[in-house]
Amino acid sequence: MRFVAIVVATALWMGAGSCANDAQNAAEAAGQAHSSLRMADDKEWLTPADEDWLGLASHYGGAYDGGERSGKAAYQSLLSGGRSSFNAVLGGGRDDRSQYDDLDAHGFYWTASEADSPLAVFYNCARGGLTLYRQPDGEKPLALSVRCVR
């Protein structure tokens, strides 16, 4: 399998189309916060931790934090066509009733970091506010996108 990868700081991130990067493809992995993928080169790719996403976001201006960081520069950089080559997809998500929503409005990306037992941290590229948000309240049964890292 050929794939695009980008390097940010010390992390290697899979590019768009390389991992489960839309909600429909991620549906099988929904709620599995610690998943991994082994590629033909026998290297393990992991669901990124919150710290990985914080590093990625910080490199491009940071996720919205309610204060100094607006999340707007990171959103513009990470979105398809942005300067990062990350090419985030606004794939929406699937709820626990198998209903898809928010296509072309939000790009939801899981982390492997739990907020507490039923919740995990995810990142939201929100088109309405042109902002990248860090959200600690993702219900694990949701099917959201995943972008792998190593």
Image (cartoon, rainbow, N blue to C red):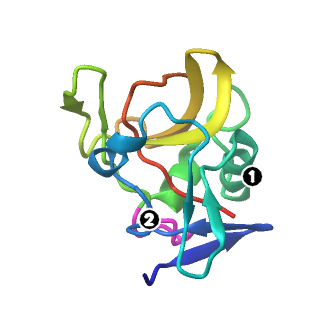
77 is higher (above) or lower (below) than 144: below
Rate crowding at label 2 as few (under 14), some (14 to 19) or many (20 or more) other CA atoms within 10 Å: some
Q: Is residue 130 left or right of residue 35?
A: left
Dot 1 crowding, Cα within 10 Å, few <14, some 14–19, many 20+ = some
Give 75 or 30, whichever is nearer the viewer: 30
Residue 135 makes an appearance in the image: no
Q: Is residue 71 magenta?
A: no
Amino acid type at circle 2 is: Asn
User: Residue 55: which disc?
Assistant: 1
Tag 1: amino acid: Gly
- Residue 74, disc: none
Q: Nearer the viewer, residue 39 or 101?
A: 39
Q: From mark 2 to mark 1, how far is it between C-alphas?
A: 17 Å
Say which quarter of the image contains residue 51.
top right
Q: Residue at x 33, y 41 (%)?
A: 27
Residue contact at pointers 2 and 1, CB within 8 angstroms: no
Question: Circle 1 sits in a helix, a strand or a loop, which is it?
Answer: helix
Q: Main secondary structure of the magenta part?
A: loop
| Residue at image location 19% in from the left, 27% down from the top | 99
- Residue in the foreground of this view, choosing between 130 and 35: 35
| Whole-percent x, y for residue 117 in the image | 63, 15
Q: Residue at x 21, y 27 (%)?
A: 98
Query: Does residue 5 appear in this view?
Result: yes
- In which quadrant of the rendered image does the N terminus lie? bottom left
- Farthest residue to the right: give it: 10
Residue 58: percent from the left, percent from the top?
73, 51
The image shows residue 140, relative to residue 104, as above or below, that is above
In the picture of the structure, the residue carrying the numbered disc 2 is 87
| First reached walking from the N terminus: tag 2 or tag 1 | 1
Residue 71 x, y percent position in the rendering: 59, 42
Residue range highlighted in magenta: 80-86
In the image, taking residue 144 as reference, residue 97 lies left or right, namely left
